[in-house]
Amino acid sequence: MNKKEIAEVLGEIGTLLELKGENPFKVRAYQNGARALETLTEKLEEVIAEGRLNQIKGVGDALAKKIIELYETGQLAFYEKLKASVPEGLMEMLDIPGLGGKKIKVLHDKLGVDSIESLEQVCRAGKVAELAGFGTKSAEKILKGIKNREAYSKRHLWWNAHEVAEPILDGLRKLPEVARAEHAGSLRRNRETVGDLDFIAASDTPEPIMNWFTEQRDVAEVTAKGETKSSIRLDSGLQADLRIVPLKQFAFALHHFTGSKEHNVQMRQRALSRGLSLSEWGLSDEQDGSPAKNSEGIDSEEALFRYLDLSFIPPELREGLGEIEVAENGDFPDLVKTENLRGCFHNHTNASDGINTLEEMAQAAQSLGWEYLGLADHSKASFQANGLNEERVIQQIDDIRKLNETGKYTAKLFSGIECDILTDGSLDLSDDVLGKLDYVVVSIHASFTQPKDKMTARIIRAIEHPSTTMLGHLTGRLLLAREAYEVDVEKVVDAAIANDVVIEINANPHRLDMDWRHWRKAAAKGLLTSINPDAHSTDHLEFVDAGVRIARKGWLSPESIINTWPLKKVEKFIKNRKR
Ligand code: DGT
Ligand code: CA
Ligand code: CA
Ligand code: ZN
């Protein structure tokens, strides 16, 4: 196990002990141990080899032994036993925001709560509101958390769904009976989360295809199997539908099952206004049901749109949000592609909570063919992420300058920071040090529960700071895990435009923030973005692909995205921003 994983286990042990009502000092010892590992700058391997583990502040002899056991074997008997002694239902409650070990213990002891269901019951019955340390507000918050948890469990991150879908699509395409195959639904539309996978295949002999689909290795359950449609549930929990149609219906089926429903409704209305009925099977005369004139030749979505006097609507824009009006009048903007990117700006190294060194990150950027890479480690308020203080920032600026001077890497490195926005909107580092950096990303990592107007004012104040170049993960949401904090996005967008500040598209598949729904309007008003992977390792640089998909979904073309710009233009932009 690595440092981070071990720290997680120690933290969980602390929580488990709390759930059991153990001595608070013992609980704290594990929490401190977890923190000590999280902020350890040295290599754990070396500290263990040199026998210095028990000398680290927060790690005593007993804890050191456990850490070594985890490090060497990946397991810890004490932890396994502890886990087994705590009811599953109590552990599940930890997913609910605002509930930690201590509170769950109270709910368990005073109200006999031992599952999410019983928690919901006592909340509704008003019993939680009466408990000391809770109250009406926290009971409401718990109920909301339960509802969110249920909704989250029904969907999957696009990134994960895509990983499952690709091999299935490849497999389908390799079958000799398959003439064409595509994925459809929300996955094809690049939605940030996906309910189920939808595949469309064209064939005259569906049976062997259905057999292959339902007998794949990862199938947990076949929920339906028919000649034209089958549904499966995979081991990952994802469900998938496959529809098989004759080749001449393929374009219609692909269009229909790509959706969205809203888009389909509008397309059907358009057909109806011409006396035609559009469905997944084809276009027919609304009156007598005969095939529409000259519609037999429609063998692609392009042809289908053309038949209805529309230009091709890219799948990610099919949300019923005005795309048909644009397609009536001509073409769409030239949507950004991953190969348009020349670098990115929000990346961590092992100086804060990243895994890789500066040089490894530089090498990885170069391997991607990028012209530049911005490093933005955390600032000191993010102590759990080993954020940099002023002195360490200055050191890193110097390291980056020296590395640039060696000319070892063709990618130019920019020294930046992901500076915490403090509770009042001031920044976590001195103005002097901020002024020395090439650029500054400002982000919120704490105090999420401020009222909307306060949060909005806080972010706008940070945007107005003369050193601020871009705003990181605007709403702090973690998809399917944590709701966005309350913030007036429109006001923040206007402030960013007024101050020439960029709002990033955080491309981490868990974030995809700012949300695609805001981008079309914001970019039209002049807002710029940077597609940033928020990489904590070299592998994470590939997250930019998820960000590009969201940018496309937000109708963005390269002009609005500063990390598609050539080096000179970017350099000039970030220099000018520093007034
Ligand atoms: P998801 O799976 O919840 O992430 O979202 P989708 O969009 O993939 O929805 P899904 O799998 O239920 O259906 C795929 C597409 O099929 C959907 O986007 C549009 C089309 N579709 C399904 N049911 C209906 C319907 O009742 N009316 C219309 N107009 N289209 C439908
Ligand atoms: Ca679907
Ligand atoms: Ca479906
Ligand atoms: Zn961050």
Image (cartoon, helix red, strand yellow):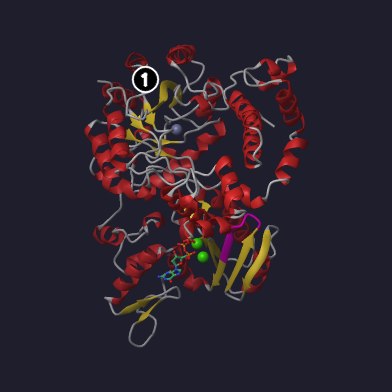
Left or right, 69 with reference to 518: right
Q: Amino acid at mark 1?
A: Asp
- The residue carrying pointer 1 sits among few (fewer than 14), some (14 to 19) or many (20 or more) residues within 10 Å by Cα, namely many
Q: Residue at x 43, y 31 (%)?
A: 344
Residue 484: x percent and y percent?
A: 40, 45
> Can the viewer see residue 528 in this picture?
no
> Can the viewer see residue 331 in this picture?
yes
Quadrant of residue 419 within the rendered picture: top left
Location of residue 469 with respect to 22 vertically, above or below: above
Q: Nearer the viewer, residue 357 or 424?
A: 424
Quadrant of residue 331 within the rendered picture: bottom left
Residue at label 1?
Answer: 438
Q: Nearer the viewer, residue 133 or 304?
A: 133
Q: Residue at x 30, y 63 (%)?
A: 310
Label 1: state its secondary structure: loop
Look at the image and give the residue range highlighted in magenta.
Answer: 235-241
Q: Is residue 505 magenta?
A: no
Q: Nearer the viewer, residue 161 or 462?
A: 462
Q: Residue at x 45, y 63 (%)?
A: 258
